[in-house]
Image (spheres, coloured by chain):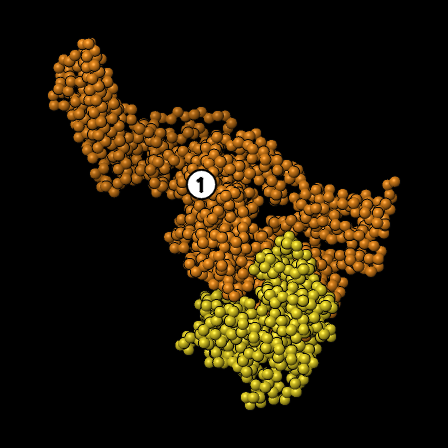
Amino acid sequence: MVNRPFNAFVMAQSQFDKIADSLGLDQATKDLLRNPIREYHFSLPVRMDDGSFKVFQGYRVQHNDARGPAKGGIRFHPQETVDTVRALAMWMTWKCAVADLPLGGGKGGVICDPHNLSMTEQQNICRAYVRQVVRDIGPIRDVPAPDVMTTGQHMLWMVDEYEQIHGGRYPGAITGKPVGMGGSLGRTEATGFGVVFALREALKELGIRPQDTTASVQGFGNVAQYAVELYQQIGGTVIAVSCWDQEAQRAHTFRRKDGIDFAELRGITDRFGGISKPQAANLGYEVLPGEAWIAQDVDILLPCALENSITGESVIEIPKRVKIIAEGANGPTTPDADHVLRERGIFVIPDFLANAGGVTCSYLEQVQSNMNYFWEKDEVLGKLDVMMTSAFVAVSEMARKRKLYMRDAAYTIAIARVAQACKDRGWV
Amino acid sequence: MAEQDQRVADILRSLKERAKELNCLYQVEEITNNAEASLDDVLRGVIDVIPPGWQYPDVCAARVCINDTEHASKHFRETTWSQSAKIKVYGEPVGTIDVVYTETMPHADEGPFLKEERKLLETIADRIGSCITHRRLLETMQSMRTPAKAAPARGREWAAILDLLRRTDQSLLMRVARKMINHLCWSGVHDAEVLLQRFSPYQGIDEPDVFLESNRPRQKNSTPSATTLADEVFDLAAVNLSDDEIISCVHGWIKQDRASFLVNTLENYHTAISEVADAIQRYQHAGHGEVELSHSTRKGLLVALVRRFLSDQLEYINVAKNYVEIKDFHQLIRRLIYPARGHGKTGGKGAGLFLAYQIVQTHKDEDKFLEEIKTPKTWYLTSDGMHDFVYCNHLEDVFSQKYKEIDEVRQEYPDIVQVFKNSQFSATIVKGLSLALDDLGDKPLIVRSSSLLEDRFGAAFSGKYKSLFLANRGSKQERLEALMDAIAEVYASTFGPDPIQYRAERNLLDFQEGMGVLIQEVVGTRVGNYYLPAFAGVAFSHNEFRWSPRIKREDGLVRLVPGLGTRAVDRLGDDYPVLVSPGQPGLRANATPEEVVRYAPRYLDVINLDTNKFETIEVREFLRSTGDELPAAEMLISIYEENHLSAPLMGRVDFQRDDLVMTFEGLLNRTPFVKQMHALLKLLEREVKHPVDIEFASDGKDLYLLQCRAQAPAKSTRPAPIPRDIAHQRLIFSANRHVSNGIVPNITHIVYVDPQRYSQLATREEMLAVGRAVGKLNKLLPKRQFILMGPGRWGSRGDIRLGVSVTYSDINNTAMLVEIARRTGDYTPDVSFGTHFFQDLVESEIRYLPLYPDEDGVTFNEAFLTHGSNLLTDLVPEFTALADTVRVIDVPQVADGNVLYVLMNADLDEAVGVLSELTSQANYSDDVEKTAITHDGADWRWRARIAESIAAKLAPARFGIKALYLIGSTKNATAGPASDIDLLVHFNGNDEQRRDLLRWFEGWSMSLAEINYFRTGYRTEGLLDVHLITDDDIAQQSSYAVKIDAVTDAARKLKMSARDPS
């Protein structure tokens, strides 16, 4: 069929097939891992504010739980499809495996648009959802988390419904809960710090001292800010950050060639990571166009904001000096640009490894919840460091030994780990 | 010595006498004031206290004779030593009072009597007279009030009343008699007709003459003596009517008559407000309850009062007359400031607020949510206060200001402001303002314009005139001066260029200016150095910006901000109010915490009490420094932590450390606010019989209504008339679901993302490319003259098959966002209602429309959108691969020079996209507010003329110019008052010529900018935008060179001077 519509699951499967073939996986393992191991489709009758009832469609997909309880978010999306949920569940399996977490992959969703629902109605949906899957989720089966259009509030309703039914407290049944209600400290920092833990190991491996490096960062939001903070702490110098200017409706890059002052810049930044242009100019920052971050003569690029920001067009602007790109954002590199990076031999820390700090912190929340003992932030971040480091080392070793591009190495190690677990259990 | 002793003794004796006399008088007072005692008792009492008051009490005696009765001291007898005084009732003598000495006494001033005793006697007679008058009145009133008493017992009581009238108020008697004769005629009493003739002023004139209306003045008939006629009338009545009927008629007429002075005062147009005010006061003080008035008299009175003080708009009177009472006006005039001989009104805002408050008061028992709604203390300065001010200072010239050219008006306006501010108010007004200040205290004030034009339903004059905040600090004199200064500025704003131009466009120039002023205390509290309400905003009973299909138009809309409501009234573009639909409070425009935080109010307006200034400050900074003092702060904010928003309970906020967001979550969920707003909007809409828009504020405790008026559609959101006879080839699409109001005119380009093609794109990258192409087109196409049409949900993230992935910056120049929901199988997908950037759309007034092409009764001219040439490749060659999916249609090119209009009507829930000639919008609807952009084309015509004359003056050889072209909005006839003139110069000269040329243009540019400022009020640095291109550019088709001989929007060549001046 010509012009077959875009299907995320088909794409995820073909990505898997490629790696599976290179690993020489047997047909049964491939068949097992190409598809979810379990799926639940259900109807959610919900009482609306006006007294009427409406039936919503919900899904929970557990792609694989050979390595541990499934883990993955629940999305509220008006045009959710089961194929999207399947693809995302599969990606969760790989993501947990590459971070070497003892977790499998899952995903869930409800076809609904929270913009058209009151908070009461959303609460009713959350509770109805849990009632449908209560036997199939939980701390030892499948641990949901917030995702598109769901928040800590939704998780709190869900965990409460779960606990009401089970007649006990099971905070480990769901993660992403508000701090103080079973949530973990350190979640805000986790992703940004995780990027730099991985970056630090990459530098170590390339034999470069952090204090000899400079970096240019795309974005100044949550991820970017903590990445910049930690990178400076380990000795690096950031000379440029780009960010979105809400007023001008376009991005700017702020540059100071001898290094930005993180505290100073954060002082003039709004809640959304927008740096005040006039104030920055007063402080002596050059204000360049938004795309300029990529063309800076630095050692390290940290794309931490947008999808598809390194494209076939912009990739040619990356200076020769750039040695490492750590993908803090999801999918910042388009496939054609990725091809160029691979050719040029740039060391890429792929997104699902570089930003695995988030899911790792979710795992740590689960652990703390299960023992009902919550750590100080330092303890959380210390454990995060250890886990990110070992995850990175495993991937880079694989890349080095098998002469793989980092992205391929990460996929390979993830799939290999899951396949191994299935085999060890005697499933295939 | 002895002589001196004698004198001292005389003085002492005389003092003793005065004391006795005074004592006597007090006793008389006491006795006559005793309402319990009968008249006989009173008189007896008086007789007893008189002798001790006289010089020789032992031989003194007194007697009172009234009509036939007589009371006297025991030993009273007539003697030669006597004094006498007449007792009068209504000026008629009814009796006498006499004092005698029974024995000879030494000679004094008047026989044996002192002159002081004469005075005392007369005073006592007076007291008795008024005592009798009072008692008679009381009796009469009582008899009127208790008609239930058995009739026989009363006998001819009405006769007594008439008797009283005969002696006291003959004109009233006459009016009552006249009414009785009419009543008798109406009851069919034949003899009454005869009597009526004698009442008739036309008596003795032949009827035909009456109708011929001869020019000769008529002879006045001498009216028969009132009493005679009345007697005859009532004799006749006694024969024909029962006593009961007569008494009840007379009773009713007298009561009606009592209000007549008020009616007379009101009906006479020449009476000044002061007289009306006196009349109301007199009426109110007389203690007449309104219930005593007949229905018609009362209505008449009220309508007259409404017309006099509030508004003469019939729609307004119709509603108001049911809600006001005379006592309300009594309250109103106590806070009314008016010139000495004034005739003014309160103006639109004043009238609106007054009525809204009365409506709420009347209905507050129906709904507990209405009970607590208040209005701030308000003083009204009447509309003629401005005329008084102008005449007082001999500024009459300003009234002709409006007939001047707009540039003159603009030029002179700053002077007018200064002149006004340096002028004096009349003494009466100053006194009134001073009283107002005493009453309002030193709370900050807002001085609001309340124009008579605002009064007119339909013409939205909101925001055209000034409203000023005053900190109202300092000495009384300073405060008074600041107040007068502010009022003068508000007055001056009547003569500002914007309102004059606005009026000119609506043919309202000749309407006489009248600017009432409201002086209102600002609702709020002191927080730190600031004064502000805890929250404020505006609310509409009709919601014209619905973000969910579940919200109905009638669910209303509230725009809520922290601090003063100014930020909710205006659309700011860079800051956002919190939007709530009171009928569907659970459905918010922003669903996720990110959205809520992103679109939360960032600034608030306050009055700085230190600097006496109105200021805008940052919400976060304000909360951090003074949040602890802010009343009800917990109701206004949420704590943002790790992507989670929680509404804190009392005492759970750390203002210094927590990340706080203005969400109003507590207010909306835990207080009756939403229900109050809903009840208020519903009530006012129902009673005013028109959708309303209101302003409100709260000091953290109570909710105050600040303003109420008919909801006038804001710019571009009036319901468009939908033509019924559109030729099918002119109709591009129609819609009949979720339609809002408005007209999107003069669309020259359509960007159409084909839903089917889009869904068939094979990769995510291609879909993302569509978003990028749209973003690029958004920057290239003329602002607000193109519309975006695309599948499903614009701005999808994540699963972008649902709609094109764009951010607000990719679409911010479009005039309209159209979402197309095509049916697939038996399933029609949802549209987004623009939720991804809903609040940006609202604040930028980008319109939104969903289309359901596959539904019955809907037109969707797919051929127009998919056939015909596609400009995509010309505009953005890098996206040529998407040409099947993204189509850019040059409407005039495809449609023989016609452009697209989108007409939307929420009342009908219908919208159409039609092709029509490029015109002013007036062709579609006369009362549609003309946007600044294309009002009657004057702006582009002027620019085109200027461009031509520049070309004619330009010497091609001197500057090395091959050709001059006009491009952009002036060429396209879409230039507005702020547009510049884009000139394209085909240049082949040297550097020196280039420099000279640019300098030559710069001179023009700056002069034109100045002229344009005076014409339109738009300040620009220069009006010319000159682009130089060379032969190379044309050869390479680079930059602006593409415009020359281009497929679409080609540059227009201008004729240059034929030869150079030597």
Q: What shade does chain B have?
A: orange
**Position of residue A365 measured from the top left corner of the image (x, y, whole percent):** 50, 73
Q: Residues within 10 Å of mark 1 (few under 14, many from 20)?
A: some
Chain A, colour shown: yellow
Amino acid at the residue labelled 1: Asp
Query: At x 57% / y 52%, what residue is drawn?
Result: B571
Q: How many marks?
A: 1
Q: Is residue A413 something one can see in this rendering?
A: yes
Residue B992 location, x and y as percent? 84, 47
Callout 1: SS? loop
Question: Residue B46, how many percent across, how many down?
Answer: 19, 26
Q: Is residue B937 above or below residue A45?
A: above
Side of A405 relative to B325 (left or right):
right
Instruction: Give the letter of the chain under mark 1.
Output: B
Q: Residue at x 54, y 80 (%)?
A: A102
Left or right of residue A76, residue B375 in this image: left
| Residue under numbered circle 1 | B442
